[in-house]
Amino acid sequence: MTTRTDTPSELQYPSGSDIITAIKAAGVEFVVSVPDIVTSDGLLWPLSTDPELKLVRVCKEDEGVSICGAMSYNNTRALLLMQQTGLMDSLNAIRAIGMDYQLPICMMVGLQGKEAALKPEDSASYGVRIIEPILRAMDIPSRLIETPGDIAHIREDIEQAYRNSTTFCFLIGRSPTP
Amino acid sequence: MRRDHALEILKPLVNEQIVVAVYQTLFDWMVIHPRDLNYVATGAMGQASSHALGLALANPQREVLVFDGDGSLLMNLGSLVTIANAAPANLHHFVFVNGVYEVNGAHPTPGAGKVDFAGMAQAAGYLEAVEFSDLDLFREGVTDFLAKPGPALAVMQIEAGEPYPRDYAYIHSAGARARFRHALAGN
């Protein structure tokens, strides 16, 4: 098992407000979500009251895959915010709508149970360890968002997904600060 | 009430609306009323209502009709609550009920003959939920149903009609998606 070099006291956390700013800069109009404890305080609660974003609360995450895919037909941009358990539960919808149909499904997934100082593949949690290999097996590109510097890529990743009509997954490895 | 006969009644009422249909109802509809604003690519079973919600929210100026199936809706019952909560006035949801998984061997659906889809929709918060089992009554009532604001659900108690071809290759094709996108843009 490998660890990052930074100690817990040196860990940096991404800013939720900066992530929301990046999402909006990418043209996202709708956020579709089932609550996730990793992103709850830093992302979902703040964006739920953001007048520039429309929140669609869904009962199950695969609904969100379909909603985001359908919205893309007139270039309405959306982001599906969920936990990795919801990602796992939605794999067939992502396979069909995101990959087979080549629609721009942009997902932001909180890695519940991941240790802040460890990489996902080194986590003691089986449910965390398997996520990146599953995404690779499905040819879904992803980016780990853990530090303030990671946020700089969000806008371009979303814009590229919509430009190329491809699916993309952000993995939130540390809880964003409110 | 035969499904294809009910669809023939709907045909003159469908012009600029988006129609999201599934499985045998879709295959029937593609022959009865072929048009580029038919949204044929729902991808995963049960997801029609969720695609329709996305379309309704992203295209608030356009009416969206869902021709769902009972087996399909049973896979995504939570979408009734999600749709009611989002409250799109431009979404009218038909569920064609025959009590079987028609394209998968005609095995019975769980609760066939017992499930109350209209009651579920009402309990979820749909503004309107009606049921049709007679073709003449459907002909009399459908215009009124469509005139009311959504989200609204019509349960269609049907039996199969003509054996329309199951054109899976078309519904999953890139060409079908491109035609819909083009039509949605008004081209």
Image (spheres, rainbow, N blue to C red):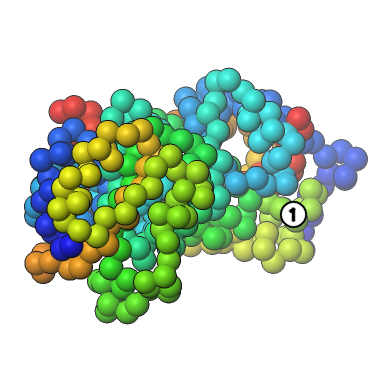
Tell me where residue A100 appears, x and y as whole percent.
33, 55
Q: Is residue B103 left or right of residue A123?
A: left
Residue A139 in sight from this viewpoint = no
Q: B159 or A70: nearer the eye?
A: B159
Tell me where residue A91 appears, x and y as whole percent.
48, 59
Which residue corresponds to the image point at 55% horizontal and 33% vertical from the top-left?
A55
Tell me where residue B62 appears, x and y as whole percent.
28, 30
Kind of element beneath mark 1: loop
Name the residue at the right extreme.
A9
Amino acid residing under circle 1: Lys
Which residue corresponds to the image point at 73% horizontal and 60% vertical from the top-left?
A122
Which residue corresponds to the image point at 69% horizontal and 33% vertical from the top-left?
A45
Tell me where residue B34 appears, x and y as whole percent.
10, 47
Which residue corresponds to the image point at 83% horizontal and 44% vertical from the top-left?
A6
Residue B16 versus residue B102 in the image, above or below? above
Q: Is disc 1 surrounded by few (<14), some (14 to 19) or many (20+) residues within 10 Å?
A: many
Q: B10 or A170: nearer the eye?
A: B10
Q: Is residue B86 left or right of residue B28?
A: right
Residue B84 in sight from this viewpoint = yes
What residue did someone put label 1 on? A114
